[in-house]
């Protein structure tokens, strides 16, 4: 065989390999497209089914919303609701207790707002949903044995509870804004699975609740979904960040000093948006830490949960169930009053 013929056959063989690889790539791309389309349809069908399940439930008739009658400079309420751990099962916590404690917060927030209104108008509320609203299934091996509802049930139940909270907020304030951040318990699969962080069950729960409210024709509700894992809060001149808390530190845990130092670096220019305060959940404890300028603060908020064995044994930490209520001066851009709202009684 001549050298020229051998080279020709080798070139033909290489060309055939290239053609085979191209064909395989096309087949793979088509398969991925079919899989993605199927997944998109499944997600859409799941959300629609869950929405229909919630809408089919009888909705209570809510009282008319109250209006401020006082004069003076108007302020806004801010509810930091976080770490409901929906479907978590402990000796003192379950789905029923979660519902009771969340509604207890709304009851107390209403009474406190009425006290504030004796001095000045409060006609809007910003509801910060801080993540870990569901318990999830993928955070530790024994988790499926420490819940009283499946992931789908958590999805529907917690979304319905969020809808209830927003509906009740409208009976207190004429205008409602929701800012939603997801948590680590909403993660789908293990940490090693190649699932984008924004594909989070918390976020899906928020979207279901938002769609239900929009379908019901609610007005004066502002709620934007964001794929970012740090949310921005604006109330007039007031600017703050909403994070879950697992974004800072190794393996989602950091000391208060570490969080404060990290946030101070954000404020020094590493985060491309000016802000005054940061709202944090994740640690199930109510605390406040001052930032370097002496004006801004980190506001840690508790959980509705109780008897967290991991926190008490692994971290030697415990907390009484609570959530956070603030009042904001939108002209001066700062917090004027803050409350730790106890939920155990």
Image (cartoon, helix red, strand yellow):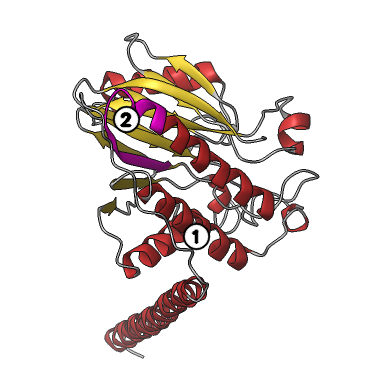
Image quarter hosting the N terminus: bottom left
Residue 77 is at least partly visible in this image: yes
**Which residue: 32% across, 30% down?**
240
Residue neighbourhood size for the residue with mark 2, other residues' Cα within 10 Å, grouped as few (<14), some (14–19), many (≥20):
many
Residue 74: where, in percent of width, then height?
A: 23, 29
Q: Quadrant of residue 299?
A: top left
Magenta highlight range: 114-128
Residue 159 tag number: 1
Q: Secondary structure at mark 2?
A: strand
Q: How many other residues sit within 10 Å of disc 1, few (<14), some (14-19) or many (≥20)?
A: many
* Residue at the (41%, 52%) spot, across then down: 166
Report the residue marked by disc 2. 240
Q: Residue at x 31, y 87 (%)?
A: 12
**Looking at the rendering, which quadrant does residue 261 occupy?**
top left
Q: Determine whether 76 is above or below 88 in the image.
A: above
What is the C-alpha distance between the residues marked 2 and 1?
A: 25 Å
Circles 2 and 1: CB distance less than 8 Å?
no
Whole-percent x and y of residue 153? 61, 66
Q: Quadrant of residue 31?
A: bottom left
| Residue 336 in the image: above or below residue 24 | above
Q: Check residue 267 in the rendering and tell me which mark sits there, or answer none.
A: none
273 and 95: which is toward the camera: 95
Q: Quadrant of the C terminus?
A: top right
Looking at the rendered image, the disc whose residue lies closer to the viewer, 2 or 1, is: 1
């Amino acid at each position: 065989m001549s050298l020229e013929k051998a080279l020709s056959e080798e070139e033909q063989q290489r060309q055939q390999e290239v053609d085979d690889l191209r064909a395989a790539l096309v087949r793979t791309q088509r398969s991925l497209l079919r899989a993605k389309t199927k997944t998109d349809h499944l997600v859409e069908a799941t959300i629609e089914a869950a929405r229909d399940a919630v809408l089919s439930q009888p909705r209570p008739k809510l009282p008319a919303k109250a209006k401020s009658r006082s004069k003076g400079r108007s302020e806004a309420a801010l509810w930091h609701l976080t770490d409901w751990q929906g479907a978590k099962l402990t000796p003192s916590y379950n789905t029923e207790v979660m519902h009771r404690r969340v509604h207890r917060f709304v009851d107390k927030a209403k009474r406190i707002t009425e006290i504030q209104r004796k001095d000045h108008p409060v006609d809007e509320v910003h509801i910060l949903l801080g993540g870990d609203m569901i318990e999830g299934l993928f955070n530790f091996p024994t988790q499926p044995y420490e819940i009283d509802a499946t992931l789908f049930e958590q999805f529907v139940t917690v979304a319905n509870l969020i809808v209830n909270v927003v509906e009740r907020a409208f009976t207190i304030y004429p205008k409602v804004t929701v800012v939603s951040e997801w948590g680590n318990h909403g993660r789908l699969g293990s940490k090693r699975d190649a699932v984008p962080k924004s594909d989070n069950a918390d976020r899906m729960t928020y979207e279901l609740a938002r769609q239900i409210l929009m379908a019901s024709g609610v007005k004066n509700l502002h709620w934007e979904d964001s794929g970012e894992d740090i949310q921005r809060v604006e109330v007039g001149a007031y600017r703050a960040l909403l994070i879950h808390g697992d974004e800072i530190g190794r393996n989602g845990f950091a000391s208060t000093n570490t969080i404060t130092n990290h946030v101070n670096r954000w404020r020094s220019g590493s985060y491309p948006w000016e802000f005054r305060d940061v709202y944090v959940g994740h640690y199930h404890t109510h605390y406040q830490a001052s930032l370097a300028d002496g004006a801004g603060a980190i506001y840690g908020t508790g959980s509705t949960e109780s008897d967290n064995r991991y926190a008490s044994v692994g971290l030697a930490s415990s907390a009484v169930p609570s959530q956070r209520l603030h009042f904001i001066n939108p002209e001066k851009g700062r917090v004027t009053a803050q409350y730790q709202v106890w939920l155990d009684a």
